[in-house]
Amino acid sequence: MNSAPTHTSTRPASWWAELIKLSEPTTKGARTVSTNFHELQRRGFITMTPSSTHGLPPTIDLLNETRTQEPYQLPYINREHYNRIPETLWTLGTIGELDGRALAMYLILIYYQREPDTWTWFSSESFQERHYLSDNIRTKGLNELVEAGVAKMQENRIQTSEGTAYRMTRRRSYQLLPNYCPPKTPRLETKKARTPDSLIFDQIKNSWPSNFDAESSGKYPRSTPDTNLPF
């Protein structure tokens, strides 16, 4: 929501709570949002500037995600490749349904699923070496993504060899469903021809779902069970 220059927003906590479908958005949900905003500020991802007018929400400024305390810039400025998160993760309320394990595996699947028809499978050893996460997180996180309708799973029997012996084993592969696939990332033609932040934002905005209104405070495509944030 703060991706447009100047990467700031001034919204009440209840608005954010309603956006991600938290229960009791004007009370309990708003407190949950406020608590997590303060935690994000403590960790160096945002700054919160109190309003000079009593009763108005603070202004939230995005900071560089590497926690250098520098202002946020769109990723194309410093990196040639980055992964985008589809807006449907929160406009459909899904982010409030997933726990930390599922969110971790969702980000990993986004990293690997560069094309819509890509299937991804993980071996226990290489997964832990590459991502430093346990088998429990991998298994339960993937299962939750399938149950939540974020990804689908297919199981195949393949032949593997150990020395001169061969055996059949099962392999589970996963693929994100269309609503949750990473959107295409705007690309610059050359490093010298930089595109202004505002134009890049327009390109990103044009890929949002047609029924998504970033300025409304409650008109979203579906209603989901009330839950608290997973952290």
Image (spheres, rainbow, N blue to C red):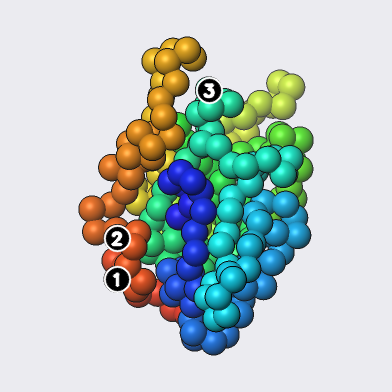
Q: Which residue is mark 3?
A: 80
Circle 3 sits in a helix, a strand or a loop, which is it? loop
Q: Residue at x 49, y 64 (%)?
A: 10
Disc sitting over residue 213 in the figure = 2
Circle 1 sits in a helix, a strand or a loop, which is it? loop
In the image: residue 103, left or right of residue 161 = left
For the residues labelled 2 and 3, the Cα–Cα distance comes to: 29 Å
Q: Quadrant of the C terminus?
A: bottom right
Vertically, is 29 above or below 93? below
Q: Amino acid type of disc 1?
A: Lys
Q: Callout 2: 10 Å neighbours few (<14), some, many (20+)? A: some
Badge 2 or badge 3: first in the primary sequence: 3
Q: Quadrant of residue 163?
A: top right
Q: Quadrant of residue 15?
A: bottom left
Q: Amino acid type of disc 3?
A: Glu
Q: Which residue is mark 1?
A: 219
